[in-house]
Image (cartoon, helix red, strand yellow):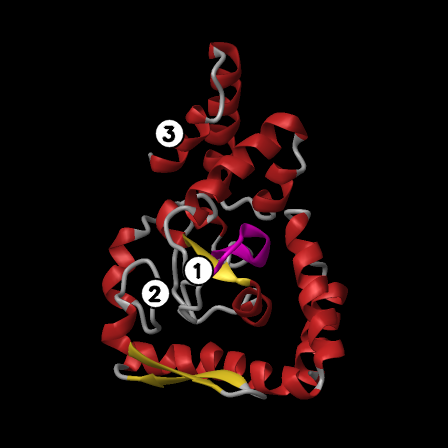
């Protein structure tokens, strides 16, 4: 398993490698049994848990320098996060499946939140790959962006925004559910930068703690996004 390999590489001492390996395997087994909130719990599970969490995020960050959804270039890890493509709050069994993790920009992560664009009926413990032919929405780890979506960047002295056009049914679904909102947020943030900055700062703070926002915090974040 790729993620387990990265966890092992994060330590040099055999004792620590074994401890981190056991921690990672324990969390993986719990996720396959349907236990929720494991992603946030791992980050807060002592020094070893945080080390395992960081090893996974560092690996996924290293897979691409662009956001998996909007394809914007990400210049620093502080401006990006790891997204569970199939939300772990809905599909806990895929919390630690490598193919379900993608690097995204703060804007896409903030707007997507825990929305499920795929709506699969998946039993606990079910395999991930057997659903690859059933994606009804663009999947950043299984699809090639240019085959599904056209991206247009417009930049002037006073305005910068991206427009997206879906070329396939999966691409059109991502455009209508996420990318259109990302473009609208960019345009509105030019007129209301204070609220936009507040929303991004709140999202960045939540992710820096490795936690999933509570319902109240998530409502506040989504309210800021709409008011931008």
Which element type, helix, strand or loop, lies under badge 3? helix
Residue matched to label 1: 85
Q: Position of residue 207 (x, y in %)?
A: 64, 53
Q: Residues within 10 Å of mark 1 (few under 14, many from 20)?
A: many
Which one is closest to the eye, mark 1 or mark 3? Answer: 3
Q: Residues within 10 Å of mark 2 (few under 14, many from 20)?
A: many
In 3D space, how far apart are the residues under numbered discs 3 and 2 (Cα atoms)? 24 Å
The span shown in magenta is 74-85
135 displayed left or right of 111: left
Which of the 4 quarters of the picture holds residue 154? bottom left
Q: Nearer the viewer, residue 41 or 155?
A: 155
User: Which residue: 53% across, 18% down?
Assistant: 19
Q: Earlier in the sequence, mark 1 or mark 2?
A: 1
Residue matched to label 3: 5
Residue matched to label 2: 139
Q: Nearer the viewer, residue 40 or 58?
A: 58
Does residue 222 show up magenta in the picture?
no
187 displayed left or right of 141: right
User: Which residue: 45% across, 30% down?
Assistant: 7
Q: Earlier in the sequence, mark 1 or mark 3?
A: 3
Q: Nearer the viewer, residue 99 or 8?
A: 8
In 3D space, how far apart are the residues under numbered discs 1 and 3 (Cα atoms)? 22 Å
Q: Position of residue 30 (x, y in %)?
A: 51, 37
* CB within 8 Å, label 1 to label 3: no
């Amino acid at each position: 398993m790729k993620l387990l390999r990265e966890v092992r590489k994060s330590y040099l001492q055999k004792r620590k490698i074994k401890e981190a390996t056991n921690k990672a395997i324990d969390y993986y087994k719990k996720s396959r049994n349907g236990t929720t909130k494991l992603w946030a719990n791992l980050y807060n599970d002592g020094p070893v848990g945080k080390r395992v969490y960081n090893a996974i995020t560092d690996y996924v960050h290293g897979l691409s320098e662009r956001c998996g959804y909007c394809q914007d270039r990400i210049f620093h890890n502080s401006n990006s996060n790891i997204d569970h493509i199939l939300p772990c709050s809905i599909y806990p069994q895929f919390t630690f499946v490598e193919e379900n993790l993608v690097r995204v920009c703060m804007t896409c992560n903030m707007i997507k939140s825990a929305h499920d664009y795929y709506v699969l009926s998946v039993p606990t413990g079910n395999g991930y790959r057997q659903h690859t032919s059933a994606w009804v929405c663009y999947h950043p780890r299984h699809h090639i962006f240019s085959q599904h979506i056209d991206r247009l960047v417009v930049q002037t002295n006073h305005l910068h925004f991206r427009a997206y056009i879906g070329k396939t049914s999966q691409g059109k679904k991502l455009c209508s559910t996420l990318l259109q909102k990302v473009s609208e947020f960019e345009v509105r943030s030019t007129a209301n930068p204070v609220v936009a900055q507040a929303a991004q700062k709140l999202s960045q703070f939540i992710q820096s703690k490795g936690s999933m926002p509570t319902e109240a915090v998530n409502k506040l974040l989504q309210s800021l996004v709409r008011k931008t």
